[in-house]
Image (cartoon, rainbow, N blue to C red):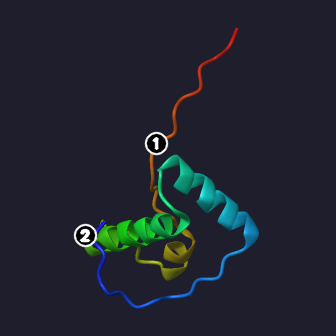
Amino acid sequence: MVKSKMPNITVSIDEDAKKVLEKRAKKNMFTLREQVEDIIRRSAINTKTGTKSSIKVDDKLVHVFSREIRGRKRKKKKNKK
């Protein structure tokens, strides 16, 4: 990772979130700080690339309560006999 002069930003998280981040950092062989930086960097990159066009609905109330299907498709469960 390239070290450059970046401003320091303080983020407060609860103990549960810290434990989850530490576990994820250990899995990825990062320090806690590096893991948080990686998450923020990836988020910024994904935001830059743009998003799909949003749902276009004439009724604003329907638009408020409608959601786009996002993320990975769920794996189908195999039936156990």
Q: Position of residue 57 (x, y in %)?
A: 41, 73
Q: Residues within 10 Å of mark 1 (few under 14, many from 20)?
A: few
Q: Residue at x 59, y 20 (%)?
A: 78
* Side (left or right) of 10 relative to 69: right
Query: The N terminus appears in which quarter of the rendering?
Result: bottom left
Kind of residue indicated by mark 1: Lys
Residue 61 in sight here: yes
* Side (left or right) of 64 relative to 39: right
Q: Residues within 10 Å of mark 2 (few under 14, many from 20)?
A: few
Residue with the most extreme right position: 15
Q: Nearer the viewer, residue 59 or 19?
A: 19
Circle 2: element type:
loop
Q: Quadrant of residue 56?
A: bottom left
Circle 1: element type:
loop
Residue linked to disc 2: 49
Q: Residue at x 54, y 29 (%)?
A: 76
Residue 56 in sight here: no
Q: Quadrant of residue 13?
A: bottom right
Circles 2 and 1, Cβ within 8 Å, touching? The answer is: no
Cα separation between marks 2 and 1:
21 Å
Q: Position of residue 32 (x, y in %)?
A: 55, 65
Kind of residue indicated by mark 2: Thr
Sequence-earlier tag: 2 or 1? 2
Closest to the camera, between mark 2 and mark 1, is 2
Residue linked to disc 1: 73
Q: Quadrant of residue 12?
A: bottom right
Q: Nearer the viewer, residue 60 or 51?
A: 51
